Amino acid sequence: MKFVKKMGILTSFLICFSSLFAFDFGGLLSNKTSFETYGKEFNFNQKNIFSLWARQNFNKSGENYFSTEVFYNFNANFDEKNYSNIVDFSLLKFAFEKNSNFGKFNFNVGRFYFSDLTDLIFTQNSDGVKVDFQNDYFKTSVYASYTGLLNSLSTEMITSPASSFLNDENMLFLEKTSQTNSNDFYNFAEKYAICEVLFSLPNIFANQTVSVEYLSAFKLEKEIFNRMYANLQFEGPIYQSFFYNLSTSFGFSNYKGENSFSILSKANLSYYLKNASFGLNAIYASGKNGFFSSFSSITKNVSTYSLQDFLYSGIIKTGLNATYKPISELLLFTDCDAIFDATSSNIEYYAFQYSVGILWQLKSDFQLGLTGCQFFDKENSNLIKKTYFCLNASLAF
């Protein structure tokens, strides 16, 4: 397609361009083989990614640079006989830094990853501009981007109001889009204008940080589904290696002329040792009950390990997590969560899930990983219950 060709030509030109400053490049080959069971059914999936990256510095210190990464992704679901081939740019960015008497500016232009304060609303690549300013007293940033040039096969967005976790029609999940034996490798995403403004006061007192953020997504075509979010976050140490993070998002949306209000709250407590960490977390996303409507994010973020794709909507999830490094090359990790239906004023227990995993850095450029997880709902339904095992391997060059 023309867009892919243009980005490829630009990337090739910049890679071939030589200068007095450092130029670096490399690649990554990764494999993900997974098995999942539900009821008496068994499913085998295969995912392979081949990526190439390059970086050209524009000064000796390396603060000003151009970087890019392109990848090919092969996906196969052998049980459903679904196959897809995806080509995309995950990075195509110019970065510049400028010091002034008032503080330091950072400019990023192009395609790059961006995440909001909650790490649950907008967490994806997009094409745009981000300007950061920082001094001894505060931090602020402005971000604007356009999603219409993204590849919808690799970046999934919520383009209509999310259903509640459980609703009157018993729709428990967001239906997965089918890409059975698709010949398309690049499909343009829905056209949204994204805007973000952040203001943060680091170390305002006792090493505590307070941040406020405005985030919006305005649809530029077809039926209107606009969203705005006002986010507030407090974070910092409680005592020595004991830290907390509290955030709340107030969501306002308009869908086909109908306004709605929703809320998302998130709390984390973390304790760090020399070779281990422990965490306690809780998330609440409003459902369609009373004054609140179902919370809808911008990026599709899945909330459970279930067979179907549950969103952060009408749900309470609380759990524990831990990591341990017996040696520097080996990481063990685990987590477990209790999940509650919060679509009505009567909050009810719904499911339990857990995962365990190991990550082994055999060499500096070769890594192996093994992960297993299980999801059990209270009805023991084969529609959503799942046992899952995944083997990962990656080789950098």
Image (tube, rainbow, N blue to C red):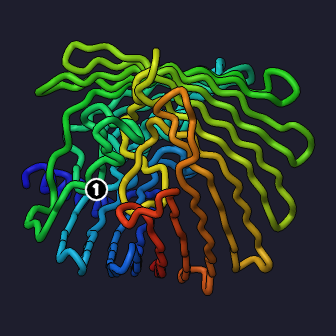
Q: Is residue 358 left or right of residue 243?
A: left
Give the left or right position of residue 361, taking residue 320 as reference: left
Image quarter in which the C terminus is found: bottom left
Quarter of the image for residue 117 reads: top right
Residue at 47 percent of width and 58 percent of height: 379
Given residues 341 and 34, the one toward you in this image is 341
**At numbered mark 1, what does the secondary structure look like: helix, strand or loop?**
loop
Q: Which quadrant, please, contains the N terminus? A: bottom left
Q: What residue type is disc 1 on?
A: Ser
Residue 237, quarter of picture: top right
Mark 1, residue position: 154
118, 64: nearer the viewer:
118
Q: Residue at x 34, y 48 (%)?
A: 173
Where residue 211 appears, as percent x and y from the top left, is 64, 24
Above or below, 180 against 158 in this view is below
Q: Position of residue 45 (x, y in %)?
A: 32, 78
Query: Which residue appears at 33% of the width and 50% of the height?
Result: 92
Can you give x and y, in whole percent of width and height, for residue 85 in the image? 19, 69
Q: Is residue 304 above or below residue 161?
A: below
The quadrant in which residue 218 appears is: top left
Evaluate whether residue 392 shows in this view.
no
